[in-house]
Amino acid sequence: MSTADVLDLAPPRAYRRLPPLAPTSVLFSVVLFIGLEVALFWYLPQIVRVFALATVDLLRFSRTAVQLGADEFLGVRLLPVLFETVRPLSYQALLLWLGGSVAAIVLLTQRRWLLMPVRYLIVYNLLLIAASAYYLLFFGRPGYDAGDFSQLYLRTVVTIWLVTPAFMGVMCLTLPFSPLEQIGLVILALAYDMVFSAARYALFVWLLVHLGGVVMANLYLFLGPLLDVIYLVGIFAVFALRLTRRISEQDLFRR
């Protein structure tokens, strides 16, 4: 086979020059983002209240006794969910958590058929559980209680809500979305984050009540609000895919 035949078999270079962003469109989008940020901060106390009540309703559905507390963050009154003190685990239970985590880590390192990113994520969580169990074996209880965990979670969630319009807005300005599409994308991301955060909050409280503090580090560090950026980027990717299809259709129509 000649070099020319190899070049013919190679896929064609796929690129498309995106249309330039109009300055007026960019300015209008920035004004919309700023307006959304101001409105979000203005109505944040009401949003936090609805968020807390929705979380409490979910927990009462699971028959978990909780109540609303009080906290202040960035000048806004928050309502963290207060639940039972994280029950201490017996030494036998902690040894089972520690031994089971170490055994699972050893087994996973030998399973080459499992994708490496998935294997790393599972091992990372098992290491956190093993470290938590090892710590609790010597100190008996974590350095923070249920109220501290709930307060930290809610503060992180509110911070992410306030950062989302700026974060998603900057991402939207990198592609030729219309201003309405951009603001719609940001509102969709915010709404999804709020609903998902409430469901996750209720699940975390339920797990802490039933499993104890050995899983507390995993819940916040791996499954907590810091993970939100992944599905925010995922929502942006869905819109970017739709934009790609629309540009392809426009190019086909021009031809």
Image: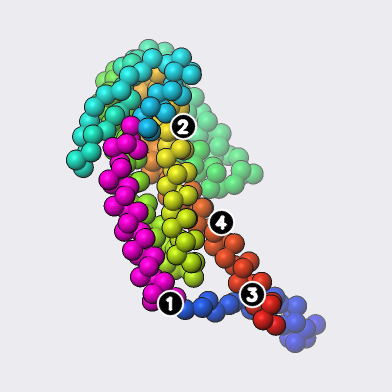
Foreground tag (3 vs 4): 3
Q: CA distance from mark 3 to mark 2?
A: 41 Å
Please provide percent x and percent y for residue 73. Answer: 22, 38
Please provide percent x and percent y for residue 85. Answer: 31, 17
Residue 20, above or below 35: below
Q: Pointer 3 and pointer 2: residues touching (CB < 8 Å)?
A: no
Query: Which residue bears the numbered disc 4?
Result: 238
Q: Quadrant of the N terminus?
A: bottom right
Amino acid type of the residue tagged 1 in the rendering:
Ala
Query: Which residue bears the numbered disc 3?
Result: 250
Residue 28 lies within the magenta run:
yes
Q: CA distance from mark 3 to mark 4?
A: 19 Å
- Which badge, 3 or 4, comes first in the chain's sequence? 4
Residue drawn 44% across the image and 68% down it: 174
Query: Which residue bears the numbered disc 2?
Result: 199
Q: Is residue 253 left or right of residue 77?
A: right
Q: CA distance from mark 4 to mark 2?
A: 23 Å
Amino acid type of the residue tagged 2 in the rendering:
Ala
Asked whether residue 41 appears in the rendered view, the answer is yes
Q: Secondary structure at mark 1?
A: loop
Residue drawn 30% across the image and 42% down it: 43
Residue drawn 47% across the image and 61% down it: 180
Within-10-Å neighbours for mark 2: few <14, some 14–19, many 20+: some
Q: Quadrant of residue 65?
A: top left
Please provide percent x and percent y for residue 211. Answer: 43, 20
Q: Is residue 44 left or right of residue 124?
A: left
Residue 22: mark: 1
Predominant secondary structure, magenta span:
helix
Q: Secondary structure at mark 4?
A: helix
Within-10-Å neighbours for mark 4: few <14, some 14–19, many 20+: few
